[in-house]
Amino acid sequence: MNLANFETMDPVMLMSIVNMKLRDDFGGDIDKLTSYFDISKPALIDKLASAGFEFLPEAGQFR
């Protein structure tokens, strides 16, 4: 799954995909995920925050 178009994705679906990628491929490291997909970390966090999700570094996922 390519996250290049994350800004136009449904935020609930985006959260699900991002959490799966964080868990399965990036060990919960959001910096590695955003670097790999060449996307803006602040923009991703803002997009998910607009739907009420917050990144929890200790859990390595959005909730």
Image (cartoon, grey):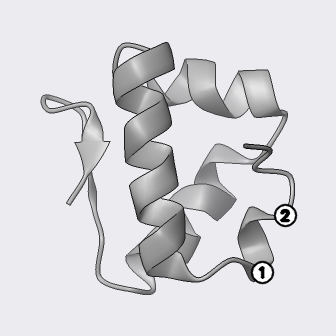
Q: Amino acid at mark 1?
A: Thr
The residue beneath circle 1 is 8
Q: Quadrant of residue 2?
A: top right
The residue beneath circle 2 is 5
**Residue neighbourhood size for the residue with mark 1, other residues' Cα within 10 Å, grouped as few (<14), some (14–19), many (≥20):** few
Alpha carbon distance from label 2 to label 1: 6 Å
Quarter of the image with the N terminus in it:
top right
The spot of residue 52 in percent (x, y) is: 29, 82
The spot of residue 19 in percent (x, y) is: 38, 44
Which residue in the rendered view is the most extreme toward the left? 58
| Residue at the image point whose x is 50% and y is 51% from the top | 17
Q: Is residue 21 left or right of residue 20?
A: right
Residues at circles 2 and 1 in contact by the CB criterion of under 8 Å = yes
| Residue at the image point whose x is 85% and y is 34% from the top | 38
What is the secondary structure assignment of the residue under circle 2?
A: loop
Q: Is residue 33 left or right of residue 52?
A: right
Q: Amino acid at mark 2?
A: Asn
| Residue at the image point whose x is 30% and y is 71% from the top | 53
Q: Is residue 40 left or right of residue 12?
A: right
Q: Is residue 25 above or below residue 6?
A: above
The spot of residue 62 in percent (x, y) is: 29, 53
The spot of residue 63 in percent (x, y) is: 20, 60
| Front one among 31 and 1 | 1
